[in-house]
Image: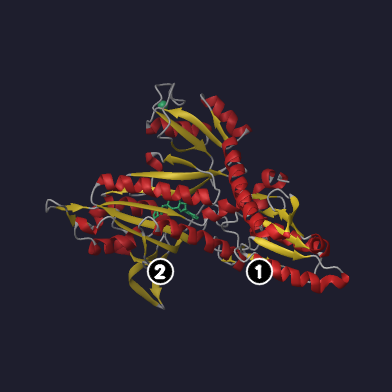
Amino acid sequence: MREKWKNNFSEWYNEIIEKAEILDVRYPVKGVYVWYPYGYKIRRHVVELIRKILDGTGHEEALFPLLIPEHEFAKEAKHIAGFEDEVYWVTHGGLEPLKVKLALRPTSETAIYPIFALWIRSHADMPLKIYQVVNTFRYETKHTRPLIRLREITTFKEAHTAHASMEDAERQVREAISCYRSFFDTLGIPYIISRRPDWDKFPGAEYTMAFDTIFPDGRTLQIGTVHNLGQNFSRTFDITFENPKGEQEYAYQTCYGISDRVIAALLALHGDDSGLCLMPEVAPIQVVVVPIWFKDKKELVDSEVEKLTDELHDFRVHVDSRDIRPGSKYYDWEIRGVPLRVELGPRDIEQGKVTLVRRDTGERFSVPRSEVRERVRETLAEISSSLKERAWREMESRIHTAAHIEEIKKLVVEKGGVIKTTWCGREACGKSIEDRVDVDILGILDEEPAQGSCVGCGEKAEKVIIMGRSY
Ligand code: P5A
Ligand code: ZN
């Protein structure tokens, strides 16, 4: 059943975040939440996954300070202009006013790049590829939401790179996109990759590539961004290197990041009216074993359950031996999205079988006890691929094409989601399209050749764009 999930998504989301013990939203600061142990375990698997991908492609993890002195923060004019409304400032040490105000990082360019200037001497020091997993602070004024729009982003995974040529920075942008693709693919999160319009790129970047997904309510969520910074920051922070010709040159840089939003998407896209459906890859518990006790058979069942858990030691298994009815146990683990349930009772034991129940489809079936390990492995893999496939299918069904402005207006009201259309590429025209339909241009699809005319002005279309209302 996915009635509430689909038709009343916001309520579903807020409820499930609490009930599944992901976040405690009662912390008394707006936009700031507490991770429950269960939610934190999911977070840990997600972080381990991105670490594995980044480590495997030559990135190195480091850790830079949370506090940024005002004079560094303010150096890059466009960057400060883009972030100044969102910065928290530390102004006092105890009762004493600080001589230099300190920003709580909203992102770490201005903490990292003065140090890159010290680390980089020659072209042989590059490419330099660093990442960190940290919390960042943004004083968001739009409606805050758990994991989606945070004032303390607790899981900011940001990478910063420096290169000896623009071509190598371009190659790095492609590598970053491919890292994020494989990350989202493992999590079964569908995405659209687009180039942000110039007026919406990262403050200080040459250009921004973004990953967006579409939620069940038709609104889009930006779940990752990759920026080519060119030499904008290296000029400001004096990051120079000696090139092979012996000349001093400014480094070419990129940066890219993902946040807690990844976890929001993971929870939101794979769910139903009974709760979460976690991807086995990141589920804190992959298999929950529920013993079915019958009067005098409790000891027999318990000893068989113990053997069974031993056989399943390759997986993250939990035995629910609480003294409550099996039905209540099923309910609890369904909310928390445990992908697979194993039931074992006297009858199963007699027949040499165990009962498996899939969280995603509700399907219930018996497998021979001797094959249980293999069958669990197979079923988890099937759950993973079918959740992923369903999420992609659903996202694609929320993308519509329009050739006229009236059609866009109609689609916005009737269907929501993302609208694909054509544009001449001129900023003034783009902004007027946004105003007339009251929907934003999310990005440009570089790969798709434009045909026909611009929906805004009727002149020759140069670009295929996607539009949508985002979180
Ligand atoms: C890239 C990493 C940056 O900050 N500097 C280092 C670059 N890019 S960004 O687009 O501004 O942010 C990266 C991603 O963070 C998510 N995000 C948020 N998540 C939760 N709450 C917020 N308030 C918030 N703001 C941004 C987005 O997914 C974004 O792509
Ligand atoms: Zn136009």
- Could you tell me residue 112's position as x and y percent? 32, 62
In which of the image's four quarters is ligand 2 placed? top left
Relative to 421, does residue 46 appear above or below in the rendering? below
- Could you tell me residue 32's position as x and y percent? 54, 63
Q: Is residue 104 toward the left or the right of residue 438 in the image? A: left
Q: Nearer the viewer, residue 319 or 268?
A: 319
Q: Nearer the viewer, residue 373 or 83?
A: 373
Q: Nearer the viewer, residue 61 or 285?
A: 285
- Could you tell me residue 200's position as x and y percent? 41, 43
Q: Is residue 325 toward the left or the right of residue 401 in the image? A: right
* Other residues around mark 2 within 10 Å, as few (<14) / some (14–19) / many (≥20): some
Q: Residue at x 65, y 66 (%)?
A: 311
* Other residues around mark 1 within 10 Å, as few (<14) / some (14–19) / many (≥20): few
Quadrant of residue 61 in the image? bottom left
Quadrant of residue 198 in the image? top left
How far apart, in angstroms, are the residues tagged by discs 1 and 2? 53 Å
Q: Can you identify the residue that label 2 sits on?
A: 90
Q: Residue at x 62, y 47 (%)?
A: 387
- For the view shown, which residue lies furthest in the left direction? 246
Q: Amino acid at mark 2?
A: Val
Q: How is the image coloured?
A: secondary structure
- Do labels 1 and 2 touch, CB within 8 Å? no
Which of the numbered marks, if any, corresponds to residue 310?
1
Q: Is residue 3 visible?
A: yes
Quadrant of residue 119 in the image? bottom left
Q: Amino acid at mark 1?
A: Asp
